[in-house]
Image (spheres, rainbow, N blue to C red):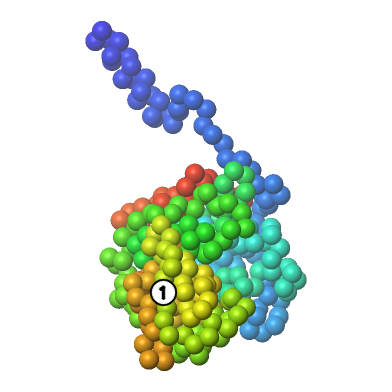
């Protein structure tokens, strides 16, 4: 019996050393039409109205530097690089910017992603190089590479945070609690904004197609599982939370994790926490996990479920 136990122990050690498993490892399904070498993409510069051809990894460095603080931990920047590369490839495949400018990508953050090559430093370069060619896939296709600055401590589904119902996104992990509020800046832990009612009225009319009339009160009608306001009554109109945030300005209405919504004088007063829609990667959460020693792939799989991280080119 003793000898048998020794043999079983030695066998287990051998399996660990050689990296073997009892069954065959699942290979991620390849993305149809995905390049096997680094592509050169066409980029529209919105500020200049010009176009240029640029290597994807060089473009990506400018995106990572613009979308995240370039002095943050390399593993947080690397997680951002994988998400941004995925976002880029998924959008190129869909041809969204092609319809607007005849190019693969643009430098407009509202149309595509932020881009600022002047912010590239050694950390950003390292993050892009160490993740070169890596994208996130789910069942043989690119995921939607969504990310936000601060999810307020809890992530949202695409339906709740973005009012996205075009197709299922089962890979988005909703309800993930990352503790990002413990390290983020004060304005993400609590913010307040006063918006003139005439501007609110115009925004509501633009969203709903009808004049909400005199706005004397506001009420949160529905909240999603994470607590985000998904439907509000403003005057005589009911509007979606995600739509209202975009119409009023996502820099002012920092998130829909609202703790207060009321009319005060000639203003709509909103209070809340977080910054962004809260879907997918949380940048402050990524920073926290990177500080704790988490690898880029671990950070991504905290926010995305049942996904593969594939290397498309060397």
> On the picture, is 281 further left or further right than 188?
right
Instruction: Using the image as rendered, state which of residue 255 and residue 20 is in the foreground.
Output: 255
Instruction: Using the image as rendered, state which of residue 191 and residue 307 is in the foreground.
Output: 191
Q: Which element carries disc 1, helix, strand or loop?
A: strand
Give the residue at the far left of this rendering. Answer: 2
In the image, residue 254 sits, relative to residue 280, either above or below, namely: below
Percent position (x, y) of residue 233? 47, 74
Q: Is residue 204 visible?
A: yes
On the image, which quarter does residue 97 sit in?
bottom right
Instruction: Using the image as rendered, state which of residue 243 and residue 304 is in the foreground.
Output: 243
Percent position (x, y) of residue 77? 44, 63
Instruction: Using the image as rendered, state which of residue 201 and residue 304 is in the foreground.
Output: 201
Percent position (x, y) of residue 20? 45, 28
Instruction: Report how many numbered discs are placed on residues in the image.
Output: 1
Of the 4 image quadrants, the one containing the N terminus is top left
Percent position (x, y) of residue 63? 54, 69
Q: Residue at x 61, y 54 (%)?
A: 167
In the image, residue 183 sits, relative to residue 118, either above or below, namely: above
Residue pointed to by mark 1:
219
> On the picture, is 75 further left or further right than 23?
left
In the image, residue 68 sits, relative to residue 211, either above or below, namely: above
Q: Residue at x 54, y 34 (%)?
A: 26
In the image, residue 210 sits, relative to residue 122, either above or below, namely: below
């Amino acid at each position: 019996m003793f000898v048998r136990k020794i043999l079983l122990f030695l066998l287990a050690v051998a399996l660990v050393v050689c990296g073997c498993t009892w069954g065959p490892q699942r290979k991620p399904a390849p993305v149809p039409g995905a390049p096997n070498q680094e592509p050169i993409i066409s980029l529209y510069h919105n500020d200049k109205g010009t176009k240029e051809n640029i290597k994807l990894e060089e473009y990506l460095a400018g995106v990572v530097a613009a979308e995240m603080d370039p002095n943050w931990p390399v593993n947080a920047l690397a997680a951002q690089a994988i998400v941004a590369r995925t976002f880029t490839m998924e959008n190129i495949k869909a041809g969204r910017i092609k319809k607007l400018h005849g190019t693969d990508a643009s430098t407009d953050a509202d149309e595509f992603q932020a881009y600022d090559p002047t912010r590239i430093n050694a950390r950003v370069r390292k993050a892009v190089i160490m993740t070169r060619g890596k994208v996130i896939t789910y069942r043989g296709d690119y995921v939607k590479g969504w990310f936000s600055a601060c999810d307020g401590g809890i992530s949202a589904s695409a339906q709740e945070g973005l009012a996205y119902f075009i197709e299922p996104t089962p890979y988005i992990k909703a309800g993930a609690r990352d503790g990002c509020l413990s390290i983020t800046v004060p304005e993400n832990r609590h913010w307040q904004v006063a918006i003139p009612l005439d501007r609110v009225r115009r925004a509501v009319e633009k969203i709903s197609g009808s004049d909400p009339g005199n706005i004397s009160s506001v009420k949160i009608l529905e909240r999603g599982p994470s607590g985000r306001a998904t439907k509000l009554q403003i005057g005589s109109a009911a509007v979606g939370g995600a739509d209202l945030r975009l119409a009023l300005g996502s820099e002012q209405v920092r998130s829909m994790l609202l703790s207060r919504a009321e009319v005060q004088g000639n203003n709509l007063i909103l209070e809340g926490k977080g910054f962004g829609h809260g879907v997918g990667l949380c940048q402050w959460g990524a920073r926290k996990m990177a500080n704790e020693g988490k690898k880029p792939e671990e950070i991504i799989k905290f926010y995305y479920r049942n996904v593969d991280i594939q290397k498309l080119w060397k």
